[in-house]
Image: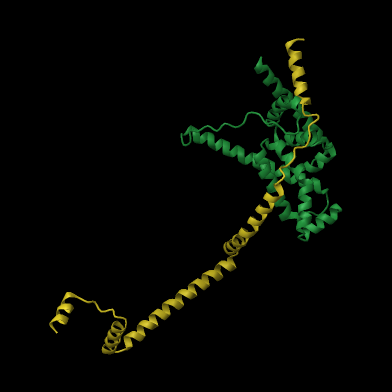
Chain colours: A yellow, B green
Amino acid sequence: MTSNDFINKQIDDTLNSINDIQRAEMSPFFYTKLQARLQQQNSSNFWENLLSSLSVKPAYTVAVLMVFVILNVAAISTLVSDNNLNNNIPKSAQEASLQSFVQDYNLSVSTIYNNDKKSAQ
Amino acid sequence: MNEQLQIQAIQNGDAKAFAQMVETYQHLVYNTILSMLQNKEDAEDVAQDVFVQVYESIHQFKGESKFSTWLYRIAVTKSLDYQRRKKRKKRFAIIESLFGVNNEVKHESIHFYHPGVSLANKEQAAILFKAIQQLPSNQQIAFTLNKIEGLSYQEVAEIMQVTVASVEAFLHRAKQNLRKELQQYYESLK
């Protein structure tokens, strides 16, 4: 047999090596893994869908932005009106209420000077 | 359960019918993907992708072709996508190694041993599988479906959505290319 014949025989044998091939079988736990993946996908889908619908549909994006702006405007306006109310109260009344608050909650700062005063009494 | 009834049940959200369908077709899907990707872990991952897609798009199946044909088509498409992604990653890794970003060279297994090949033909089949990987995609699909899955030309044509004559041409060219590849391999051993 010449070298070429030998190579041709090897090629034929190689091509015929899969003639009686059997089907490869999947691992027995495949369905369990697949189920886990489908469940994981379903649980993450809700947030993904929400985010994607918000970012993709312009109407939703505009609506979200409007809500955001309205909330900010409302917060700023209540802050401003609170400040105005505080400004209308006379200064002496403000100080008196502040002092009573400090006394109620014992927030006065005790100093060495205070201690000396107490011991002298 | 009749196949049509089973598909209707899956379309109506019947989990048991879906489990039965997976049980029936998992080996068909796995064997096709494994023969194309030649890696057990990758094949199992892609098989999961296939069934996830089946679960999500079962409503699109109108029964115009056989269910197995539809399933084969998804399996082949997913395998090709995976091959492309892997090739892109490989190219990127080569560029990275050229610029010294990652000097580690990843060694992939040289031979793939298909579990369905008899022990006597194991080594030769591994050489053949390596040559199959060098084929253009159309020839690789036709060869895999016909020679490994044992499908007829007609069935392969339906899956690939081409004519039977095209399948014959793909297979003829695949055999020629495989011969060339194997000749080079055996001559290099001399």
What x and y, as percent, mark residue B30? 73, 42
Could you say which quadrant of the image residue B160 lies in? top right
Q: Going 70% across and 33% down the picture, which residue do you hit?
A: B136
* The N terminus of chain A, quarter of image: top right
Left or right: B78 in relation to B153? left
Q: Nearer the viewer, residue B154 or B163?
A: B154
Q: Residue at x 80, y 58 (%)?
A: B9
Is residue B107 visible from the viewing direction of this image? yes
> How many marks do you count on the picture?
0
Task: Examine the rendering and report whether any part of residue B177 can be seen.
Answer: no
Residue B172 drawn at (x, y percent): 79, 29
The vertical placement of B41 against B98, above or below, is below
Indicate whether B179 appears above or below B139.
above
Foreground: B6 or A85? B6
Residue at the right extreme of this rendering: B2
- Compared across the picture, whether B159 is left or right of B131 comes to right
> In the rendered image, which quarter contains the C terminus of chain A?
bottom left
Q: Residue A2: horizontal and vertical position, in percent?
A: 75, 10
- Picture coordinates of residue B168 (x, y %)? 81, 33
Q: Nearer the viewer, residue B54 or B111?
A: B111
Q: Residue furthest top?
A: A1
Q: Is residue A79 above or below residue B144?
A: below
Quarter of the image for residue B148 reads top right
